Image: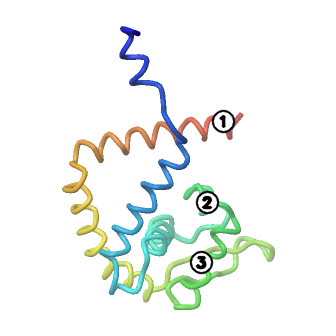
């Protein structure tokens, strides 16, 4: 019988990707339930928020800042553009484009923000604020490791 309990409790068991995807699906469902009635899903709210904060931004830069593939970003932008909440404008030259939020998009985001805040507070209550803060720290650490790898 092993007396090294630290090694057994610190060794990951199971597939990390599967566990992360399970949690992501549940957290997405949680936020989407709170945002229901706002006309947005959490992915759309996040996109509007990023474009609003970054100002007019090139799609490639937006995808990079959101750790999202270009094709996924394009697919996720389409309904927001169709709704009139985002627009694609000209960039610095004829080949470049910039995404910017419209006034209708800002208003849509403002209305949804109250629901997002309720979702965030409810998640903090469900998991515990300390757990959520620790989770954020672990996620930031993991993302930083991948960003370092990308830079090499």
Q: Is residue 13 left or right of residue 73?
A: left
Q: Which mark is residue 124?
A: none
Asked where in the image residue 147 lies, by quadrant, the reply is: top right
* Residue denoted by label 2: 68
Q: Residue furthest right?
A: 95
Q: Which mark is residue 77?
A: 3
**What secondary structure is found at the residue carrying circle 1?**
helix
Ranked by sequence position, the earlier of labels 3 and 2 is 2
* Residue denoted by label 1: 149
Q: Position of residue 87 (x, y in %)?
A: 59, 84
**What secondary structure is found at the residue carrying circle 2?**
loop
Ranked by sequence position, the earlier of labels 3 and 1 is 3
Q: Position of residue 127 (x, y in %)?
A: 25, 51
Q: Is residue 17 above or below residue 22?
A: above
Is the residue under label 1 in contact with that under label 2 (CB below 8 Å)? no
Quadrant in the picture for the N terminus: top left
Q: Residue furthest front?
A: 1
Q: Is residue 106 above or below residue 62?
A: below
**What secondary structure is found at the residue carrying circle 3?**
helix
């Amino acid at each position: 019988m092993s007396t090294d309990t630290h090694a057994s409790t610190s060794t990951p068991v199971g597939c990390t990707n599967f566990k992360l995807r399970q949690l992501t699906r549940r957290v997405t469902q949680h936020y989407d339930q709170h945002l229901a009635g706002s006309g947005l899903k959490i992915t759309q709210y996040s996109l509007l928020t990023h474009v609003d904060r970054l100002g007019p931004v090139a799609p490639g830069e937006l995808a990079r800042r959101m750790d999202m593939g270009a094709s996924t970003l394009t697919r996720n932008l389409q309904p927001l553009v169709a709704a009139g909440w985002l627009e694609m404008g000209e960039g610095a030259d004829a080949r470049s484009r910039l995404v910017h939020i419209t006034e209708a998009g800002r208003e849509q985001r403002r209305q949804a923000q109250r629901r997002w805040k309720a979702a965030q507070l409810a998640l903090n209550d469900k998991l515990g604020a300390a757990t959520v803060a620790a989770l954020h720290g672990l996620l930031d650490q993991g993302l930083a490791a991948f960003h370092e790898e990308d830079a090499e």
